[in-house]
């Protein structure tokens, strides 16, 4: 017959285990990453008798986690995306504030500088006005330098954050690998039963890892998980963990890149890492920080180059031609750490209008040099041969190779990256400001025709005969000579270029009419070149001659602001997604104290009922003893 005592005892033991499990759930209701555990009951095999099978009680076959792997993976992905946009938004907002804020941005300083220049034009001989202009120029260059310094500091901060994130990732991957090993051992000792608490710990670490970097996981037959990052690199393989590291980039040892370290060596993987804090940091650096610093440098370079060119076309209070007003560093060339040759590359700006807001890679294959964009690898055609007499030309740059390179040598060309950091004021003496035009035009009082001559404009300040007097005399209404020589065709309004100066004559001249181009002696009250200097801020000198200095900076502010708003919007959306996924995860895996309280009552009553069966069995046994004892 069935063993009534054994059957009831099996129930008591099972319900006691269920009560223990319920207590465990309640105790861990606030434990991060804990998944509610559920006991699975099954009937013990019945015993056969003449009139059928009689049950022999119950047993807990396993304890399972209330865990949905699909929801867990969604939470992992949502965590990674949220962390990415969170760090992007934090850093992007700082760049946006730097550029757009009136106290830290460039617009105010630019406007103050050109306003001071206009004040000088209103009174060209005023020394106080000239000193004020130099003061505003110092303020403008200081603003450029301060903004670039802030961006460099932000870059250093990104590098420090990258290093810390790599250390955190290494610690997490090692802990996950250790848990893999413990889970295999624990489940082996338990006959294959799941090590639920260890599994929870591992899942929590994986989610924490995904907050640093986007990962993919693959569960193995033995219960371990492998974790892959980037382009498929195995960060965790069973009980073994590979490590990440940081090292200086190919061209700049101060720019930290992430490398994957395994038995075969170190491999740079920054370009393939996405998601999480680390992916967001790397994305911010390439997507916003580098282009912003490049564009700011391009603005400084354009201001210095165009303003200097115009200033050299003017004359100062002492009657001397103007020199450079601003100083700015030439394009920077960095050698690859893998170079074996002694190649020296010198780069200068040839045409601001043709420049692009990017860096370049110059590479030598052993026979020829090739140039490509550093941001997308697109090839850039080059003209010339690379010699000093015939330099390579590409995108407004002049490239001279002055020493031999070895096959495979590479160089990073940064046209404007250091321009904002290096811009300064070259003029110290207010009298050296070249506000006046160095040449002027005159017409003779004896002219008979109605032809008039316009003001001269310097087009080549390096012409050695720029300040030499030249006389134009008309031979007839359609022909003129210069200094008594030649016979040049005349068309009313067409530009005439003599000794680096350009002007136009309009109207109908008579034979013998005379016009003179001469040194603007005593022209201290002239502001012709000063007006041209003011116009520099509006001249289209960038992006193929379609964008001015003001517009270039305005486009930078707009682009950064737009990107920042997009990131903020994405962060808001991802925050909602993460909240919803987390709520779903908790609804499936979280501990509900009301439910557990009900389970306590249910299992307590079941335990008490089983105890009553034991009492009945005891009564029957005592009755049997009493009957047989007679």
Image (cartoon, helix red, strand yellow):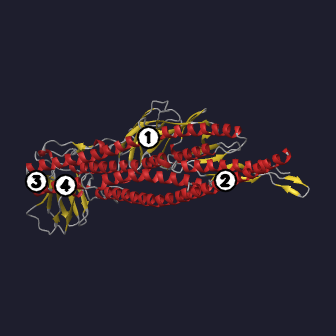
Q: Which badge, 3 or 2, comes first in the chain's sequence? A: 3
| Left or right position of 510 against 355 | left
Mark 4 crowd level (few <14, some 14–19, many ≥20, 10 Å Cα): some
The Cα atoms of the two marked residues, 2 and 4, are separated by 89 Å
The Cα atoms of the two marked residues, 3 and 2, are separated by 106 Å
List the residue tagged with mark 2.
608
User: Eyeballing the image, is 146 above or below 575?
Assistant: above
Q: Which badge, 1 or 4, comes first in the chain's sequence? A: 4
Residue 19 in picture, x, y percent from top left: 63, 50
The Cα atoms of the two marked residues, 2 and 1, are separated by 80 Å
Q: Are marks 2 and 4 in contact (CB under 8 Å)?
A: no
Q: Which badge, 2 or 4, comes first in the chain's sequence? A: 4
The label nearer to you, 1 versus 3, is 1
- Dot label at residue 124: 3
List the residue tagged with mark 4.
112
Secondary structure category for the residue under label 1: strand
List the residue tagged with mark 1.
412
Q: Which badge, 4 or 3, comes first in the chain's sequence? A: 4
Residue 78 in picture, x, y percent from top left: 52, 55
């Amino acid at each position: 017959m069935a063993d009534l005592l054994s059957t009831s005892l099996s129930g008591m033991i099972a319900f006691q285990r269920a009560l223990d499990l319920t207590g465990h759930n309640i105790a861990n209701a606030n434990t991060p990453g804990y998944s509610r555990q559920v006991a699975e009951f099954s009937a013990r095999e019945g015993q056969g008798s003449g009139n059928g099978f009689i049950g022999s009680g119950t047993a807990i076959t396993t304890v399972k986690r209330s865990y949905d792997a699909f929801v867990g993976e969604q939470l992992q992905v949502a965590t990674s995306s949220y962390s990415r946009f969170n760090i992007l938004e934090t850093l992007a907002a700082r760049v946006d504030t730097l550029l757009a804020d009136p106290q830290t941005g460039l617009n105010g300083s630019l406007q103050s500088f050109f306003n001071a220049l206009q004040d000088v034009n209103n009174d060209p001989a005023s020394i106080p006005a000239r000193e004020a202009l130099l003061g505003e120029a110092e303020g403008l260059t200081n603003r450029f330098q301060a903004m670039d310094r802030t961006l460099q500091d932000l870059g250093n901060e990104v590098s420090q954050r990258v290093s810390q994130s790599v250390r955190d990732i290494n610690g997490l991957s090692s802990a996950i690998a250790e848990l893999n090993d413990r889970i295999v051992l624990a489940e082996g000792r338990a006959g294959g039963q799941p090590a639920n608490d260890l599994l929870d710990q591992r899942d929590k670490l994986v989610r924490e890892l995904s907050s640093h970097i986007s990962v993919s996981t693959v569960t193995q037959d033995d219960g371990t998980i492998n974790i892959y990052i980037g382009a498929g690199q195995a960060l965790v393989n069973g009980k073994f963990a590979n490590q990440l590291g940081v090292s200086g980039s190919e061209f700049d040892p101060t720019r930290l890149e992430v490398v994957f370290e395994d038995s075969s060596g170190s491999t740079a993987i920054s370009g393939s890492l996405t998601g999480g804090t680390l992916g967001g940091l790397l994305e911010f650096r390439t997507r916003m920080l580098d282009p912003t610093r490049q564009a700011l440098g391009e603005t400084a370079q354009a201001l210095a180059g165009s303003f200097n060119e115009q200033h050299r076309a003017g004359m100062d209070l002492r009657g001397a031609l103007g020199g450079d007003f601003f100083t700015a560093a030439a394009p920077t060339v960095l050698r690859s750490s893998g170079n074996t040759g002694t190649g020296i590359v010198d780069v200068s700006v040839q045409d601001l209008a043709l420049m692009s807001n990017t860096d370049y890679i110059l590479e030598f294959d052993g026979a020829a040099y090739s140039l490509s964009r550093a941001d997308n690898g697109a090839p850039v055609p080059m003209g010339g041969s690379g010699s000093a007499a015939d330099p390579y030309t590409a995108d407004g740059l002049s490239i001279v190779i002055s020493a031999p390179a070895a096959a495979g040598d590479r160089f990073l060309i940064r046209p404007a990256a250091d321009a904002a950091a290096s811009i300064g004021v070259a003029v110290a003496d207010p009298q050296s400001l070249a506000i006046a035009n160095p040449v002027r035009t005159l017409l003779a009082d004896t002219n008979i025709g109605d032809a008039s001559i316009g003001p001269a404009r310097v087009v080549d300040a390096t012409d050695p005969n720029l300040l030499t007097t030249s006389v134009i005399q008309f031979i007839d209404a359609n022909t003129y000579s210069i200094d008594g020589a030649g016979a040049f065709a005349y068309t009313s309004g067409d530009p005439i270029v003599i000794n680096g100066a350009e002007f136009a004559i309009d109207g109908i001249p008579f034979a013998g009419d005379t016009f003179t181009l001469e040194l603007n002696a005593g022209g201290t009250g002239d502001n012709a070149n000063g007006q041209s200097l003011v116009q520099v801020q509006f001249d289209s000198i960038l992006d193929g001659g379609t964008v001015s200095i003001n517009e270039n900076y305005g486009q930078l502010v707009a682009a950064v602001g737009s990107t920042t708003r997009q990131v903020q919007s994405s962060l808001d959306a991802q925050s909602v997604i993460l909240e919803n996924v987390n709520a779903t995860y908790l609804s499936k895996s979280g501990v509900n104290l009301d439910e557990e309280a009900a389970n306590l009552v249910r299992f307590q009553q079941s335990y008490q009922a089983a105890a009553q069966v034991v009492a009945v069995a005891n009564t029957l046994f005592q009755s049997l003893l009493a009957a047989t004892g007679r």
